Amino acid sequence: MKLQQLRCIYEVVLNSFNISTAAKTMHTSQPGVSKQIQLLEEEIGVQIFQRHGKRLVGLTDPGEKVFDSISEIIRESRNIKNISAEYKNNNEGVFTIATTHTQARYKLPKVVETFIKKYPKVNLNIHQGNPSQVTEQILKGEADVGIATEAIGSNDKIFCIPCYSWNRSLVMPKEHPLAQEERITLEHLASYPLITYDYAFTGSTIVSKVFKDSNIEPNIMLTAIDADVIKTYVNLNLGIGLIAEMAFDKEKDRNLIAKDVSHLFPVSTTYIGIRQDTFVRTFTSDFIKMFIPQMTDRELKIILEKRQV
Amino acid sequence: MKLQQLRCIYEVVLNSFNISTAAKTMHTSQPGVSKQIQLLEEEIGVQIFQRHGKRLVGLTDPGEKVFDSISEIIRESRNIKNISAEYKNNNEGVFTIATTHTQARYKLPKVVETFIKKYPKVNLNIHQGNPSQVTEQILKGEADVGIATEAIGSNDKIFCIPCYSWNRSLVMPKEHPLAQEERITLEHLASYPLITYDYAFTGSTIVSKVFKDSNIEPNIMLTAIDADVIKTYVNLNLGIGLIAEMAFDKEKDRNLIAKDVSHLFPVSTTYIGIRQDTFVRTFTSDFIKMFIPQMTDRELKIILEKRQV
DNA sequence: CAACGTTACGCTCTTCGTAAAGATG
DNA sequence: CATCTTTACGAAGAGCGTAACGTTG
């Protein structure tokens, strides 16, 4: 069993079972990848991939299990690289943030600007996804940190640090009837087509819980992944939008108005999550400090020491 | 980075930083191991081993962290081997039990006899150690299952199944004054030199807790790892022995008598522990069934499904 | 000086690229 | 027939064993 063989399998799975594209991402030849997979399957005596003729179409039953182990091995080998890079005292490396649209669009840009100035040699990646994808990426070590509000806090392999709290805003065209309303109620929300985040109504999220608890059935007209899409449809007068307060920009969204609805929904807290048992590089903890400016060095140090290592 | 290099480092650490013996356990040449370590250190640009001149004497600071990752990788690669061996449907492989002396000596022999008859091709290892060593071995994947009473249950990476409950016995020479005593009290115990398990008084174990709670200071004359040693010293009339009830054998220990002290100490439960996130082979779950005969197939299946996988 | 580690060297087996052939949908 | 995978083959390189040399305590 060779690491290279495991890497091949890993990349092939990540590339939807396409050996050719996997080879490209690995900067090697396609027959090489093919061969290494065959060699490993031969060595362990078990087919890892399901095949339709010669094409790979999925993992076999043992393949699924083997792949889980391979993922862990790849994650740990990345960890070794991080450790050594850190001790070489060079501020180089790869830093991957997994986050939701709201963060990526409205909160991260400033921080990222500061970060890349301080660490110009660090290769920064931002992976955008929904909260459960963010969680996934942290768990698999595909992202060094994840920033999200939902989902991320409920996994005990993820160590979470609260960043800031925010409330929701209701956005609507300026001429919308509700625009004059002084105090918005849940009934108001339910009486117009509602446009909001898609994951807000999958799973037990805050918004869906509030409606459920009050026995009011909202009229979800459209669910979108990000606030920009939501605002676009609100602009088309297709409904009212329920978004995070920071996703409203008075200048850019000057055709809309936002009304605070913090009295309807409990406050939400956004967290940074990092995987337990994983080495944290200096630039990673530095990034956390940048993202949570009110946090002192000492606080962060104390918090990070609470992690299982 | 190659798996073989990681294996070399792993074995060198396990062999107390002796490259020569590590090479022997790996069935390869000593210069080969030496070379591979150098190559990896060169590749990652960090010294993993502390050296006195040419001799390896320990891990460096980054080496410690790297070694943790390496251990995980080795564990996962063993896991891959287990998975494939299982799916090849051959009842071959390695099965390692970590356990305490009491289990190994008084409970395991019968079960092991049954086991090796059913699985003659399985290479069975029994690692004997104290409860915290058993826990360690489960965590590191050096043992497939661990059987112990203390320590094992308190780690959330270990999945525990209760096996049986037992009480303690006080053993003493037949002519000992306490031999006539009808109802032994804690004060009795404290008034004679006591010989018991060494780990019974390290950490917050049941026995030490009982004495502490009653404010009675026992006179611990000698602590031993196993009941046989304890009984030997009791035979020499150096004190009274506090051991697990199953460690007393009427026939073999005919010079001693055992008195039940279940009214003094709460009952103890022995557990089988297996690591979470680890593939469980058929012969492993079969072993568990043999060790806990009252457990039905269905119960075991339900229990094992509760594991995080 | 005995035990241990590194260097040197040559043989063998692997790996990896290119080119070409075979499958798949 | 365009895309994808396997086979074939040769060059470059990695791995490993033996032997010799250097270090350490």
Image (cartoon, coloured by chain):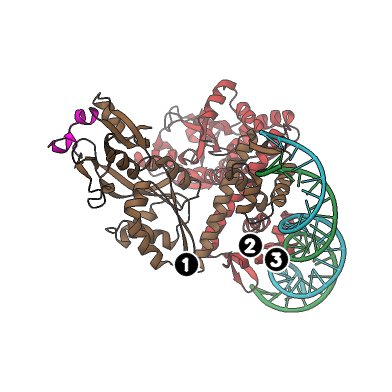
Chain colours: A red, B brown, C green, D cyan
In this orientation, does residue B258 appear?
A: yes
**Image location of residue A70, percent across then percent down:** 59, 54
Picture disc at residue A35: 3
User: What segment is highlighted magenta in the picture?
Assistant: B174-190
Disc 2 designates what residue?
Answer: A17
Say few, some or many: other residues with alpha carbon within 10 Å of mark 1 (under 14 / 14 to 19 / 20 or more).
Answer: few
Q: Which sits in the foreground, B255 or B246?
A: B255
| Number of the front mark, 3 or 1 | 1
Please tell me whether residue A43 is drawn above or below residue D22 in the rendered image.
below
Disc 1 designates what residue?
Answer: B121
**Image location of residue B188, percent across then percent down:** 19, 30
Earlier-in-chain disc, 2 versus 3: 2
Q: Secondary structure at mark 1?
A: loop
Mark 2 → mark 3, Cα distance in angstroms? 15 Å
Q: Amino acid at mark 2?
A: Phe
Task: Say left or right for A184 vs C8.
Answer: left
Residue drawn 52% across the image and 64% down it:
B85
Say few, some or many: other residues with alpha carbon within 10 Å of mark 2 (under 14 / 14 to 19 / 20 or more).
Answer: many
Mark 2 → mark 1, Cα distance in angstroms? 36 Å
Disc 2 and disc 1 in contact, CB within 8 angstroms:
no
Residue drawn 23% across the image and 26% down it:
B214
Q: Secondary structure at mark 3?
A: helix
Tally of numbered discs: 3
Q: Which sits in the foreground, B226 or A176?
A: B226
In this orientation, does residue A253 appear?
A: no
- Is B261 one of the magenta-colored residues? no
Mark 3 → mark 1, Cα distance in angstroms? 32 Å
Q: Secondary structure at mark 2?
A: loop
